[in-house]
Amino acid sequence: MKIRALFVTLSGLSAAAVAVLVLAAVPAPAGAIAQPVGPAMPEECVCSRGLRLAEAPPSVLHNCQCGPLQCVVHAQSGQLQCR
């Protein structure tokens, strides 16, 4: 039984060595090219008609798509939150 265990161990080590050699021979993929990231400034926004939250005092939320940004605007206070 010791010979069989030795054979299994050697087979596993051989397989691991072959895998390491194969992975070392494969060229690494080209690195990603970083795009310059400027401040996230919306250029043009498209907004929903608004969701009325309260009648008195009037409170309306608008969902807006501003380029890659998705924004929520509280119309009465002018607060804007984008992500």
Image (cartoon, helix red, strand yellow):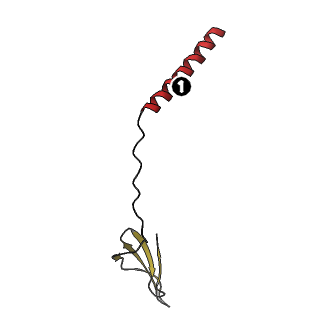
Which residue bears the numbered disc 1?
16
Q: Where is residue 71 in the image (x, y as percent from the top left)?
A: 43, 74
Q: Which residue sits furthest right?
A: 2
Question: Where, quadrant-wise, is the N terminus in this rendering?
Answer: top right
Q: Position of residue 35 (x, y in %)?
A: 39, 60
**Depth order, front residue of 76/6:** 6
Toward which corner of the image does residue 6 lie, by quadrant? top right
The residue located at (49%, 24%) in the rendering is 18
Q: Where is residue 16 in the image (x, y as percent from the top left)?
A: 53, 25
The residue located at (41%, 57%) in the rendering is 34
**Depth order, front residue of 9/38:** 38
Identity of the amino acid at label 1?
Ala
* Secondary structure state at the residue bearing disc 1: helix
Q: Is residue 7 left or right of residue 72?
A: right
Q: Position of residue 55 (x, y in %)?
A: 47, 88
**Depth order, front residue of 71/11:** 11
Toward which corner of the image does residue 45 lie, by quadrant? bottom left
Q: Which residue sits furthest bottom?
A: 57
The residue located at (36%, 79%) in the rendering is 49
Q: Is residue 50 left or right of residue 3?
A: left
Toward which corner of the image does residue 51 lie, by quadrant? bottom left
